[in-house]
């Protein structure tokens, strides 16, 4: 890596910050009612003002999330530029921040609930009764370890309080058969202890339909529903908080969630093979069809139980915190593969994920010029799969049947981490220096049980974080930071079903892939102005992303001619971009916010995949430009109610999808959401329209060879298939809430 060029690229843009620095000096008549609310976050594992720390963070309040019906990744992704978060049809996440992350089997972006990282399908679960959502941009390796290479999403839930008994009930109903109910209760037990309960249930028919249902041949015994993306979801969370003594407090949670819905039901469209080969662009006449005429519709059932325990000892000069967690997820994916509308030949993919984490942290609590933190972290995750190919029911007699099941993927994997970390922040007056260090020891063991392949790999990652913050005025800071992150190594999936690969001692083994690594340089500026009525932030970043892992389809090494999904290290890339965000309280009723982001991501010179030279080519899963505009209006009425009107407008530019050598460009799109309603101290009545203009768009899109569609198209080349996840079409809903 050329560090000289890196620093030059960063500092050559410094003038942009200086050009806008006068914002902090703009003044207006002081009015407390017009001041923006201070935003407090825990990005560095302590409460700090977002405008005073050298990190790029977007915060969504719990009130905004509730009003805008932000219940999953799709809406979070639309709300934040340079952030690409979407939910696949199987409810697993596609995630990237600043062009870093993964669409597929790798993690890439960390998900955290109340300080505990969650994994696999649990990462896309819905979490309600939220105090705030924090979106941390850039590698978070020093604070949070592996699988946070692109950034982190932090859900901070509302904690029990001893103030008074209170609660809230909300019922929402709308188009596509949506019925959604929530309840939250805060119950003081005595002067020191309180309990909080939150639960929800949701039924959604989805927006994709199957013309093969009801079956003209099999009628009601057909396995395929008319509403392909119909799902049911429910959860409950119970938390307990209290003081054991004046210096010792406890916060404990237990949760259960259940999802029953589709798996891998992407929309599919034919692409003109010749036209695609020439341009790699999505044709303008794509249908964005919500009708999927197939006979292999998959299902997905998932249950998760989890618990956490946080204990804090307040000492003279420092706090000691212990956070312990456990989660257990059972997942069953079932796919009909016989081409008929009956479950005759199908795959069963039962998986279990068990994760245990333990963090011990010591944090300074004084007001001195030096703040510090140190800690230890350990985790263990166990994943087990026992997949079978069920070959249907054979009639043995008048009343006898037998089902033959053939194992095709049976594996066990254990992932463990042990880490030590620390951070020191020194206030030197006009300057603040922060230095962080983490040693992350990871180990992964995998066994393909059915064929006897075994492998183990491990490594120690040394991660650093450095920042310099300059106080420009009482209301403005500038900063420069360097941060590192990584994604642990994995195994190439083709080995699980391939002929044996032999290790140095003659043992059967698996093909390992190296961890991803990233270093990011960032120059930023933050300010409040107009006597607290406005805020403005800007950031410029430059990242080196090494040994990138991609999931794609390759020929089976057994020579059979079949294709298999694989994870492989492709090469190195460079990401650079800019971000701006501004908010202003126009008057006591209206607040307007806007943000924009731009990313340039390309493969480094010398990156080769086979005979293909990727040098200088753009990388996949990156939205080049994105911007957002929101307006929040609240005006008291004479009858004791308050009139509410909110608007969110999101623009997403073009996005390349697919393997580096087989890229399909997804078209840009714009989405507008609107909320209008009335509220007082007790009641809230809201009317919501998602995607007001009825924009047709895909959140992700990739090209595939044509194995299931017939026909040839232009130029005599076989048609190819574009497969992607459709965005939410226009849907209207109404909700009523009662607080007590």
Image (cartoon, rainbow, N blue to C red):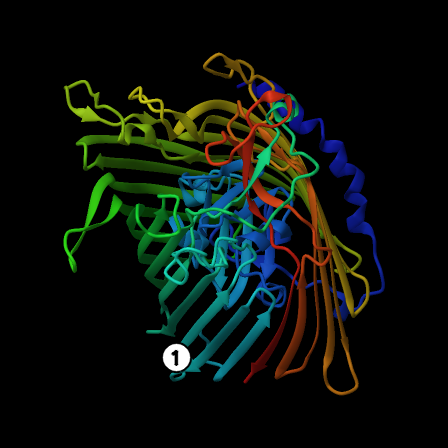
Q: Name the image quarter holding residue 642.
A: bottom right
The residue that appears at 56% across and 15% down in the rendered structure is 605
The residue that appears at 57% across and 73% down in the rendered structure is 172
Q: Nearer the viewer, residue 662 or 102?
A: 662
What residue did someone put label 1 on?
192
**Is 640 left, or right, of 315 in this rendering?**
right
**Is 248 left, or right, of 665 in this rendering?**
left
> Looking at the image, is 123 positioned above or below residue 453?
below
> Looking at the image, is 493 positioned above or below residue 339?
above
x, y percentage for residue 360? Answer: 33, 53
- In this orientation, does residue 428 appear? no
The residue that appears at 28% across and 50% down in the rendered structure is 350
> Looking at the image, is 201 positioned above or below residue 303?
below
- In this orientation, does residue 621 appear? yes
x, y percentage for residue 110? Answer: 45, 46
Q: Name the image quarter holding residue 438.
A: top left
x, y percentage for residue 79? Answer: 63, 52
x, y percentage for residue 572? Answer: 50, 23
Q: Nearer the viewer, residue 714 or 183?
A: 714
């Amino acid at each position: 890596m050329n560090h000289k060029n890196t620093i030059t690229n960063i500092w050559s843009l410094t003038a942009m910050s200086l050009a806008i620095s006068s914002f902090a000096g703009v003044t207006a008549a002081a009015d407390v009612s017009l001041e923006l609310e201070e935003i407090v976050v825990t990005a560095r594992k302590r409460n700090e003002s977002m405008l005073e720390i050298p990190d790029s963070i977007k915060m969504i309040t719990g009130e905004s999330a509730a009003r805008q019906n932000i219940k999953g990744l799709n809406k979070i992704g639309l709300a934040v530029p340079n952030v690409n978060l979407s939910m696949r049809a199987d409810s697993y996440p596609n995630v990237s921040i600043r062009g870093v992350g993964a669409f597929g089997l790798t993690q890439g972006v960390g998900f955290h609930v109340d300080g505990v990282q969650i994994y696999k399908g649990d990462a896309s679960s819905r979490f309600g009764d939220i105090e705030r959502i924090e979106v941390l941009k850039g590698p978070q390796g020093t604070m949070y370890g592996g699988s946070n290479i692109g950034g982190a999403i932090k859900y901070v839930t509302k904690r029990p309080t001893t103030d008074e008994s209170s609660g809230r009930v909300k019922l929402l109903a709308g188009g596509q058969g949506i019925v959604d109910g929530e309840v939250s209760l805060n119950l003081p037990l005595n002067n020191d202890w309180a309990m909080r309960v939150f639960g929800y249930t949701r039924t959604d028919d989805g927006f994709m339909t199957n013309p093969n249902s009801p079956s003209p041949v099999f009628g009601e015994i057909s396995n395929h529903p008319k509403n392909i993306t119909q799902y049911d979801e429910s959860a409950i969370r119970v938390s307990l908080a209290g003081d054991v003594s004046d210096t010792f407090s406890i916060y404990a949670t237990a949760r259960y969630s259940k999802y029953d819905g589709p798996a891998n039901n992407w929309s599919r469209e034919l692409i003109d093979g010749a036209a695609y080969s020439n341009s790699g662009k999505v044709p303008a006449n794509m249908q964005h069809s919500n009708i999927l005429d197939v006979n292999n519709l998959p299902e997905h059932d998932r249950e998760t139980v989890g618990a956490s325990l946080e204990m804090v000892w307040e000492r003279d000069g420092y706090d000691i915190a212990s956070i312990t967690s456990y989660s257990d997820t059972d997942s069953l994916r079932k796919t009909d593969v016989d081409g008929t509308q009956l479950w005759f030949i199908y795959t069963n993919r039962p998986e279990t994920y068990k994760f245990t984490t333990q963090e011990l942290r010591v944090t300074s609590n004084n007001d001195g010029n030096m703040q510090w933190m140190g800690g230890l972290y350990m985790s263990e995750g166990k994943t087990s799969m026992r997949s079978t190919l069920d070959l249907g029911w054979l009639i043995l007699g008048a009343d006898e049947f037998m089902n033959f099941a053939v194992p095709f993927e049976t594996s066990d994997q254990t992932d463990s981490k042990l880490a030590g970390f620390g951070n020191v922040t020194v206030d030197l007056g006009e300057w603040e220096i922060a230095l962080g260090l983490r040693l992350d020891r990871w180990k992964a063991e995998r066994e393909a049980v059915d064929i006897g392949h075994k492998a183990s790999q491990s490594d120690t990652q040394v991660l650093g974080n450095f920042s310099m913050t300059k106080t420009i005025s009482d209301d403005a800071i500038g900063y420069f930071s360097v941060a590192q992150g990584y994604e642990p190594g994995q195994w190439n999936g083709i080995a699980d079903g391939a002929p044996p690969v032999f290790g140095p001692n003659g043992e059967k083994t698996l093909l390992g892939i190296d961890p991803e690594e990233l270093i990011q340089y960032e120059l930023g500026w933050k300010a409040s102005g107009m006597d607290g009525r406005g805020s403005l932030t800007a950031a410029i970043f430059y990242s080196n992303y090494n040994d990138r892992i991609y999931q794609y389809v390759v020929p089976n090494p057994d020579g059979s001619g079949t294709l298999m999904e694989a994870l492989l290290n492709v090469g190195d890339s460079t990401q650079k971009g800019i971000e701006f965000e501004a908010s202003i309280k126009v008057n006591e009723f209206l607040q307007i916010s806007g943000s924009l982001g731009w990313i340039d991501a390309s493969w480094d010179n010398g990156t080769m995949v086979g005979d293909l030279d990727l040098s200088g080519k753009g990388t996949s899963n990156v939205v080049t430009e994105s911007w957002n505009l929101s307006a929040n209006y609240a005006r008291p009425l004479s009858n004791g109610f308050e009139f509410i009107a909110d608007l969110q407008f999101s623009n997403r530019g073009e996005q390349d999808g697919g393997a580096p050598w087989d890229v399909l460009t997804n078209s840009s799109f714009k989405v507008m959401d609107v909320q209008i309603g009335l509220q007082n101290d007790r009641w809230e009545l809201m009317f919501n329209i998602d995607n007001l203009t009825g924009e047709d768009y895909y959140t992700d899109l990739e090209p595939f060879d044509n194995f299931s569609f017939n026909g040839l198209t232009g130029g005599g080349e076989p048609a190819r298939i574009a497969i992607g996840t459709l965005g939410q079409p226009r849907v209207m809903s109404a909700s009523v809430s009662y607080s007590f």
